[in-house]
Each structure stands twice: as structure tokens, then as C-alpha cells.
Image (cartoon, rainbow, N blue to C red):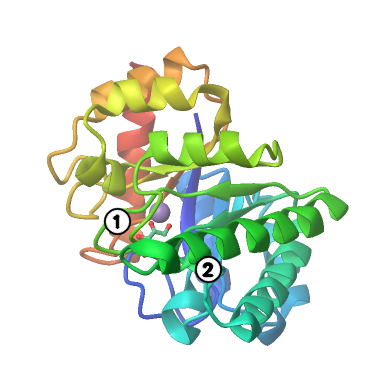
């Protein structure tokens, strides 16, 4: 199993992620604990020192499996389904920056919160969904030009009001007909939305390209009540080759949460 830990490159209101004054010390800790990858979340790659980040990651020989983009929605309300053309345009521009950033490592680019919320019903909802499809196809085209792939992350209904389950995301992707886009499953969201962990992962099959791990309370796996046995059995049964990336609250603090997670994942890998 390939392991990774989600780290933010900018201060953010999203709490289930590592962030600190020293990116180097976070990265050194992850390396020391035996992680193979670091997932990087960034509101706008243009606002950070990309060269410095690249150098630090390279010096620690870590893979960057995915780039998180949701902070652009949380902090700036950028959304691919916005009814305002200008906002959709800005969101695509922003994701272009994420795609460029991802291309140096061949990372996946995550389409989670950045898809925005749809109006609750009626014509307006249909229209916003069309906007989302159009914007996403544009992003996918930009991604293809850079050899980058996108992943849709089903999120629970309290965060985003569409594509909440893996099945909905799979159906959406099959109607879109773009094989440059896969699925990112997150155990925290699955715990709220999926009827059956095992079955949902089996249905995702080879379209599952990335996995976020957190327990039911967003703590490290093993510290809540999710049935991880069925999740890992399903990942083995689909011969999942991607990363299992921790996206957890830093409780009681980053080093301990990172250690608890890798210990848990190593134990699972031995089963
Ligand atoms: C992002 O990966 C995620 O899982 C969301 O809960 C962000 O709010
Ligand atoms: Mn997630």
C-alpha cells in the first residue's frame, strides 16, 4: 500500500490537514515516519514559492500523488458550477494553475468542493449542472495538454449538494464520456453517504485512482468507528494501486496524528 499525508501550503479554514510554519519540518517528519507521498493542497499555486516547494519535496524523495483545490472554494467561493460566467472563468483559470503545478509531478488534480453547490431544484439546477459539465470538460482538456488527470471526489451532503456518492459520480462520468477523469473516494464522506463501503469500492473498480483516509470523526484511522477491514478488503479485491492519503484533524497534534495513521496503515498492510 502506498501511503501519503495531506498538507496545506497555505493557511486555511479547512482543519483536516497538516499546516505549519515550516513545510520542511512537516516533510521531514513524514519521510522519517515512512510515508511515500505527500498530497499538497493549495488555494493558488501562484501565491507560493513553487520552486522552493519542489526542491524540498525532491530532497526528501517523496511522490506527490494529488493536488487539493478546495481552498479556492472555501476561501474565495470559486466554483465550476457558478451561475456567473466570470466566476466560472476565474475558477477554470485557477484550476489551470493547479494543473500546471501538478504537471511537474504527474499528480492528480482533485475536483471536490471546487465544483460548488447547485440550486436546490428546477431549471436553475439543470442549468448549473450544465455549467459544471462544460467547465469540467474545459479543465480536463487543459489537463490533457499537460498529461494530468483529474479526480472527482464525492463529498457528503453537508458540504456539497451533488455527486455525494461514488455511484452518482460513476454515472456522471459515464454520461460525460471523458476517460481523463477518475474517482477519489474519501472514507469520511463514504461513512455518511455510502450504504456499503465494500460494495461502493468494488463498483468504482479501476476508476478509483485516489483514496482519502480518515475515521468517522476525521481523526486518524482507528480512532473512530469506521469499519476499515471492509475498506481494505475491497481495495485489495480491486487490486488498487493508488495512494491511501490521510486527510485528518491534527489531533492531538501533527506528529502524533501522522504516526498513528502510518502505524495503522502498516498494520493493515501486514494483514
Ligand atoms: C477534501 O478532500 C474533503 O474531503 C472535503 O471534506 C473538504 O471540505
Ligand atoms: Mn477528502
Residue pushed farthest top? 237
Which residue is more in the foreground, 74 or 62? 74
Residue pushed farthest right? 145
Other-residue count near label 1 (Cα within 10 Å), few / some / many at <14 / 14–19 / ≥20: many
Residue pushed farthest front? 123
Q: In the rendered view, does 257 fall on the left or right side of 100?
A: left
Task: Tell me which residue sits at (40%, 33%) in the image.
Answer: 167
* 76, above or below 216, in the image: below
Which residue is more in the foreground, 32 or 113? 113
**Alpha carbons under labels 1 and 2: distance apart:** 35 Å
* 80, above or below 147, in the image: below
Return the mark for residue 81.
Answer: 2
Task: Tell me which residue sits at (52%, 24%) in the image.
Answer: 240
Task: Tell me which residue sits at (71%, 60%) in the image.
Answer: 139
Return the mark for residue 97.
Answer: none
Q: Residue 81 appears at what percent x and percent y?
A: 53, 68
Q: In the rendered view, does 163 fall on the left or right side of 251?
A: right
> Where is the C terminus found, in terms of image quarters?
top left
Return the mark for residue 257.
Answer: 1
Q: Residue 71 appears at what percent x and percent y?
A: 48, 75
Amino acid at each position: 500500500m502506498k501511503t501519503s499525508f495531506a498538507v496545506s501550503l497555505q493557511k486555511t479554514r479547512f482543519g483536516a490537514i497538516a499546516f505549519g510554519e515550516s513545510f520542511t519540518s512537516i516533510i521531514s517528519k513524514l519521510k522519517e515516519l515512512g510515508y511515500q507521498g505527500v498530497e499538497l493542497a493549495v488555494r493558488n499555486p501562484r501565491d507560493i514559492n513553487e520552486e522552493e516547494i519542489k526542491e524540498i519535496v525532491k530532497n526528501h524523495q517523496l511522490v506527490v500523488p494529488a493536488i487539493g483545490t478546495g481552498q479556492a472554494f472555501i476561501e474565495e467561493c470559486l466554483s465550476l458550477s457558478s451561475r456567473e460566467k466570470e466566476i466560472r472563468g476565474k475558477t477554470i483559470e485557477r484550476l489551470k494553475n493547479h494543473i500546471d503545478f501538478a504537471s511537474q509531478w504527474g499528480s492528480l488534480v482533485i475536483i471536490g468542493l471546487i465544483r460548488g453547490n447547485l440550486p436546490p431544484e428546477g431549471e436553475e439546477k439543470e442549468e448549473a449542472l450544465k455549467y459544471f459539465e462544460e467547465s469540467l470538460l474545459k479543465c480536463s482538456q487543459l489537463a490533457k495538454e499537460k498529461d494530468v488527470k483529474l479526480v472527482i471526489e464525492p463529498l457528503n451532503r453537508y458540504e456539497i449538494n451533488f455527486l455525494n456518492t461514488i455511484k452518482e459520480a460513476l454515472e456522471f462520468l459515464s454520461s460525460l464520456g471523458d476517460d481523463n477523469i477518475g474517482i477519489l473516494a474519501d472514507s469520511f464522506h463514504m461513512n455518511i453517504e455510502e450504504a456499503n463501503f465494500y460494495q461502493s469500492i468494488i463498483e468504482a473498480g479501476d476508476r478509483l485512482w485516489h483514496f482519502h483516509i480518515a475515521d468517522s470523526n476525521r481523526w486518524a484511522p482507528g480512532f473512530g468507528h469506521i469499519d476499515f477491514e471492509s475498506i481494505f478488503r475491497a481495495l485489495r479485491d480491486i487490486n488498487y494501486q493508488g495512494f491511501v492519503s490521510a486527510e485528518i484533524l491534527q489531533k492531538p497534534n501533527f506528529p502524533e496524528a501522522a504516526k498513528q495513521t502510518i502505524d495503522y496503515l502498516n498494520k493493515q498492510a501486514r494483514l
